Image: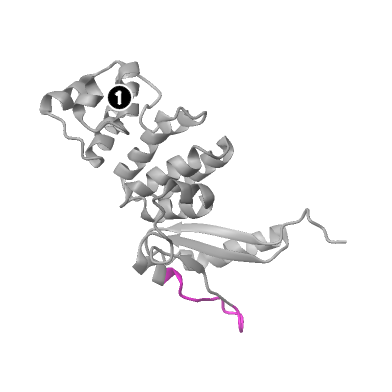
Amino acid sequence: MLRTDRPVLGVVVEVQRGRDPQKRWSWPLYVTSLRARIECPTVLLVVCVDAAVASWCAKSIPIGHPGWALRPLVLGPDSIPVVTDADEAENLPELAVLSAMVHGSQRFEVLDALHKGVLCDVDDERAQLYADVVLAALQTEYARSYLEALLIAEKYEYQSSFAKRYFAEGEARGEARGEAKAILAVLDVRGVALTGEQRARIEECLDLSQLQKWVRLAAVAGSADELFD
C-alpha cells in the first residue's frame, strides 16, 4: 500500500542577490541535512535577480567524493516570465510570486498583479508567506515601500508586521516619521509630484490617523490634489 503521509521531494530555496563564495560550502550541507531529516530526494533551487549572479550560482560544486557534485537548479531573470496581468497571477500564484521576487524591483506593475491576483485572493497564511518572501527578495527600499503600502491599504490581518517597519513602536513622533517616509517613497516611485509645501505638510504631520489615510491614498492617487482632498 502506497503511503501518502510522507514527503516525496524536499526543496531548499535560496534567494541570492550577489556572489557569495561561502554558499558553495554551505549549500551542499543544506541539501544533505534536509534529505536526512525528511528521508526523501532533495534539490537546491536558487532564485537570482541578476543574470550574472544566476550564471555563477549554476556552476557545479564538487564535493570531493568521487562522482559526487552538486549542480544547483537556478531561476534567473531570463528564465522567469514577467507577470503583469492579475488574472494570470491568480491562475498561477507561485509563478507570480517568483516574478515579483525577480522583476518587482524594476517593474511595479508586477507587484500590482501579485497584490490583486494573489495576495487579495488566497488565505491569510499563504498571503503572509508570499508577501514575506517577496519583500525579502526586493532589492530597493522604494519597491518594498510600494508593496507594503498596497498591503496596508487592504487592512490585512497581518498588516501590523509590515507597518512596524515604518511605524516603529515607541514615541508618536517616531511612528509619524516612519509613516511620512513610506508616503513620500510611494508617491515618488509612482511619479506623483509634490510641492515643497505639500511635502512639508506630510513630513511635519503628527496625526497618525491622518498619515495612515495618506498611506492608503498614496498607492492609488493620480495627483497630489487627490491625496489632500
Asked if the magenta segment contains residue 117, the reply would be: no
Q: Is residue 66 above or below residue 55?
A: below
Question: Percent from the top left, x then y, of residue 56?
Answer: 40, 71
| Quadrant where the image shows the C terminus | top left
Q: Is residue 19 left or right of residue 8?
A: left
User: What residue is at 71 percent from the left and 61 percent from the top?
Assistant: 8
User: What residue is at 49 percent from the left and 30 percent from the top?
Assistant: 156
User: What residue is at 29 percent from the left and 42 percent from the top?
Assistant: 142
- The outermost residue toward the right is 1
Q: Residue 213, located in which quarter of the rendered image?
A: top left
Asked if the magenta segment contains residue 58, the reply would be: yes
Question: Percent from the top left, x then y, of residue 178?
Answer: 31, 28
Label 1 element class:
helix
62 or 84: which is nearer to us?
A: 84
Q: Is residue 219 above or below residue 65?
A: above
Say which residue label 1 marks: 214
- The outermost residue toward the left is 196
Question: Percent from the top left, x then y, of residue 227?
Answer: 25, 25
93 or 140: which is nearer to us?
A: 93
Q: Residue 191, located in which quarter of the rendered image?
A: top left
Q: Tell me which segment is drawn in magenta.
A: 56-68
23 or 2: which is nearer to us?
A: 2
| Quadrant where the image shows the N terminus | bottom right
Mark 1 belongs to which amino acid? Answer: Trp
**Main SS class of the magenta portion in the image:** loop
Q: Residue 7, located in which quarter of the rendered image?
A: bottom right
User: What residue is at 27 percent from the left and 17 percent from the top?
Assistant: 206
Q: Is residue 109 left or right of residue 35?
A: left
Label 1 environment density (alpha carbons within 10 Å; few <14, some 14–19, many ≥20)? many
- The outermost residue toward the front is 87
Question: Percent from the top left, x then y, of residue 139?
Answer: 34, 51
